[in-house]
Image: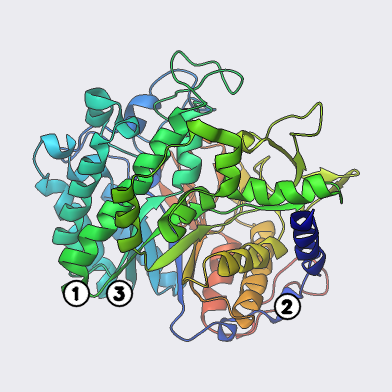
C-alpha cells in the first residue's frame, strides 16, 4: 500500500501542466552551446541500395516482400540522398542549425559484416558527408545502428537472436571509430532498440518479421522470448562498443558516446491506484528496459515480475562489463503522450500495439476528449507538456545524466494524389515545435541537463511500415522528381535559431509572423 501512496503522491504533484504560452519561446532560452539540429536515418533517405558495392540489408529484403509496407513501397531510392547529399547539406546549413544527426548504413560499410571486407566506397561516402558538414560548421551526430543490419548476418546466425552479433556490432563500431572518429565527436550506439526489438520479434512488423499469438500470426517466432533475447544482445553489444570506444579511442579523439531510446509518456486513464501504478509499469517496459541495465545494472523490477524466466539474466561477468561501460549521455526520442489503463485487473482490455507485453492498454482520448490534437499518425497526438514530464522523469531516474532530444516531430498524412502545396503550409507542425520546445526550456530551467534538440526530420522520407504515407520533414520531397521544397516549419525553425523572439499567429489566426 505504501508503494501506491508514493506513486499517487508523484502523480498528484505532477498534474497536467498548463499549456505554457509558446509566443515567448526563442533561442535565448537555451544555453549558448546547446546543439540544435535535424535527424535522419540511412535507410529512410539514402537510396542507392545496390550502388557503391553496398550489401543487402534486412530492410532491403523485408520491404520487397508483399504486405510488409502499407503502400507497397520501399527505400530503394527514398530521397536519393546518396547522390544529393551536397544539396541536402545546403538545406541543413540554410536552417542555421549547428548539428545534424544521421546514421551509418551497416551494409554500406561492411556488406557482409565481419565475414567480408571494409567497403572503401561506403567509407568514402561518409567521409565526404562528414567533411562537408564540418566545412559548414555543422557538428556530425552519428548513429551506428538505426534498425538496419547486413542481411548476411540474418542468414548466417539469425541476427539479433544470436550472441554472435555482439562481435559483429563491435567490429562495425571499431571500423567507424577508426575511420571517422577523428572528426565525429558524438556517437549513438543504437536508435530505439526498445521499439525495434518489439516490432521485430513481438509483432513481426519489422524484419525479420517474427511473432506468435496472441500478438500476431507469423510463420516463425516466439513473442514471449525472442524480443528479450534480442534486447539482451543489444544491451551487451552496446556495452561492448562503449568499452571499445573508451579504451581505444575516447582519450585521443575526445568524443562522447550514448544510446537513443523511444520515450513515450503516459497519463493514467482513470484516477485509480491500478492505473496510476500501471503508468510506471508501462514506462518500465519502454526506455528503462535498456537504460536500467546500462546505467543501473539490471532490468526494471516490473519486467522481472511480469516476464519471470523469459527475461534473460546477466552473468556476474556481464554485470561487471555493464558497470565499467558507462555512457556519456542519453538520447531521447519523444513524440507523444497517451492515456494508459492497467490490463492485469481490467477486462476486457485491448493491449497496446507497441508495449502490450507490459499488460497495458492505451488511448488518445478519455470521456470523448482527445489528449491532444491529432496528427497524420493515428498513434501520435500533439501533447507538448509530455516533453517536460518525460525529461524530468529521466532526470530523476538516472541522476540527471546528460540528455539530448534526438528526435521530436510531427506527422502529416500523405497519399500519391497530393502535391507539395498540400503540405508546405504546415501550421500544425509549427504549433507542435513551439509547444514542445517551450516545455523543453521549462525542464532545463528546472535543472534538467539537456544539451541538444533535433527535429525529426530534415526531409520527408520512407517511414518504415508506413512507407510514404506519412511526412515528417521540414522539407517536402516530391518522390518522382526529388525536388525539395521548404515548408513553413523550415522557415519557422530558421527564424527561431536566429535568436529572435517569435509570435505564434497574427490576429487573423491564420498566418504566422516572424520577428526580424
Mark 3, residue position: 136
Q: Is residue 290 above or below residue 447?
A: above
Q: Which disc, if any, is residue 251?
A: 1
Residue 12 visible here = yes
For marks 1 and 2 on the same chain, the one whose residue lies earlier in the sequence? 2
Question: What is the secondary structure assignment of the residue under circle 3?
Answer: loop
For marks 3 and 2 on the same chain, the one whose residue lies earlier in the sequence? 2
Residue at the far top in the pictured view: 219
For marks 1 and 3 on the same chain, the one whose residue lies earlier in the sequence? 3
The spot of residue 114 in percent (x, y) is 14, 39
Between marks 1 and 2 in the image, the one whose residue lies nearer the viewer: 1
Q: Quadrant of residue 28?
A: bottom right
The residue closer to the viewer here, 497 or 290, is 290
- Dot 3, crowdedness within 10 Å: few (<14), some or many (≥20)? some
Q: CA distance from mark 1 to mark 2?
A: 44 Å
Question: What is the secondary structure assignment of the residue under circle 2?
Answer: helix
Q: Is residue 162 above or below residue 248?
A: above
431 left or right, relative to 368: left
Residue placed at 40% from the left, 34% from the top?
A: 229
**Marks 2 and 3: in contact by CB < 8 Å?**
no
166 left or right, relative to 312: left
The spot of residue 112 in percent (x, y) is 17, 34
The spot of residue 16 in percent (x, y) is 80, 64
Q: Quadrant of residue 466?
A: top right
The residue closer to the viewer here, 225 or 158, is 225
Q: CA distance from mark 1 to mark 3?
A: 26 Å
Q: Is residue 122 above or below residue 409?
A: above
Residue 374 visible here = no
Residue placed at 73% from the left, 78% from the top?
A: 23
Question: What is the secondary structure assignment of the residue under circle 1?
Answer: helix
Mark 2, residue position: 23
Amino acid at each position: 500500500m505504501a508503494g501506491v501512496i508514493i506513486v499517487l503522491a508523484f502523480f498528484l504533484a505532477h498534474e497536467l501542466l498548463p499549456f505554457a504560452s509558446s509566443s515567448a519561446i526563442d533561442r535565448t532560452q537555451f544555453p549558448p552551446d546547446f546543439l540544435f539540429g535535424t535527424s535522419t536515418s540511412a535507410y529512410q533517405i539514402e537510396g542507392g541500395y545496390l550502388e557503391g558495392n553496398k550489401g543487402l540489408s534486412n530492410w532491403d529484403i523485408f520491404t520487397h516482400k508483399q504486405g510488409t509496407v502499407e503502400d507497397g513501397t520501399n527505400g530503394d531510392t527514398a530521397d536519393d540522398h546518396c547522390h544529393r547529399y551536397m544539396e541536402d547539406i545546403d538545406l541543413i546549413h540554410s536552417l542555421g542549425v549547428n548539428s545534424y544527426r544521421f546514421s551509418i548504413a551497416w551494409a554500406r560499410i561492411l556488406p557482409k559484416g565481419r565475414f567480408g571486407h571494409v567497403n572503401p566506397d561506403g567509407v568514402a561516402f561518409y567521409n565526404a558527408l562528414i567533411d562537408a558538414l564540418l566545412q559548414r560548421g555543422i557538428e556530425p551526430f552519428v548513429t551506428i545502428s538505426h534498425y538496419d543490419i547486413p542481411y548476411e548476418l540474418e542468414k548466417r546466425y539469425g541476427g539479433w537472436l544470436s550472441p554472435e552479433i555482439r562481435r559483429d556490432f563491435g567490429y562495425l563500431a571499431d571500423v567507424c571509430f577508426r575511420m571517422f572518429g577523428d572528426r565525429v565527436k558524438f556517437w549513438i550506439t543504437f536508435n530505439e532498440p526498445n521499439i525495434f526489438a518489439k516490432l521485430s520479434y513481438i509483432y513481426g512488423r519489422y524484419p525479420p518479421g517474427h511473432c506468435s499469438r496472441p500478438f500476431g500470426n507469423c510463420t516463425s517466432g516466439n513473442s514471449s522470448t525472442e524480443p528479450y533475447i534480442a534486447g539482451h544482445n543489444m544491451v551487451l553489444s552496446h556495452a561492448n562498443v562503449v568499452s571499445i570506444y573508451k579504451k581505444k579511442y575516447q582519450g585521443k579523439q575526445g568524443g562522447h558516446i550514448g544510446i537513443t531510446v523511444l520515450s513515450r509518456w503516459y497519463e493514467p486513464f482513470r484516477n485509480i491506484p491500478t492505473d496510476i501504478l500501471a503508468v510506471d509499469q508501462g514506462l518500465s517496459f519502454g526506455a528503462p528496459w535498456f537504460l536500467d541495465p546500462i546505467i543501473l545494472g539490471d532490468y526494471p523490477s516490473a519486467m522481472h515480475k511480469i516476464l519471470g524466466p523469459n527475461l534473460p539474466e546477466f552473468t556476474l561477468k556481464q554485470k561487471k562489463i555493464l558497470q565499467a561501460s558507462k555512457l556519456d549521455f542519453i538520447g531521447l526520442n519523444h513524440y507523444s503522450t497517451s492515456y494508459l489503463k492497467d490490463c492485469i485487473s481490467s477486462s476486457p482490455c485491448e493491449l497496446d500495439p507497441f508495449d502490450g507485453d507490459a499488460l497495458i492498454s492505451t488511448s488518445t482520448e478519455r470521456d470523448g476528449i482527445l489528449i491532444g490534437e491529432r496528427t497524420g499518425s493515428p498513434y501520435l497526438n500533439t501533447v507538448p507538456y509530455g516533453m517536460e514530464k518525460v525529461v524530468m522523469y529521466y532526470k530523476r531516474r538516472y541522476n540527471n545524466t546528460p540528455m539530448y532530444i534526438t528526435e521530436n516531430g510531427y506527422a502529416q498524412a500523405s497519399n500519391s494524389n497530393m502535391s507539395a502545396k498540400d503540405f508546405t503550409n504546415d501550421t500544425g507542425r509549427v504549433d507542435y515545435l513551439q509547444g514542445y520546445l517551450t516545455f523543453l526550456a521549462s525542464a532545463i530551467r528546472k535543472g534538467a541537463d539537456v544539451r541538444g534538440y533535433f527535429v525529426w526530420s530534415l526531409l520527408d522520407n520512407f517511414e518504415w511500415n508506413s512507407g510514404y504515407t506519412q511526412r515528417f520533414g521540414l522539407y517536402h520531397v516530391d518522390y518522382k522528381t526529388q525536388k525539395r521544397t521548404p515548408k513553413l516549419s523550415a522557415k519557422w525553425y530558421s527564424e527561431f535559431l536566429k535568436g529572435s523572439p517569435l509570435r505564434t499567429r497574427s490576429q487573423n489566426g491564420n498566418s504566422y509572423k516572424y520577428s526580424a
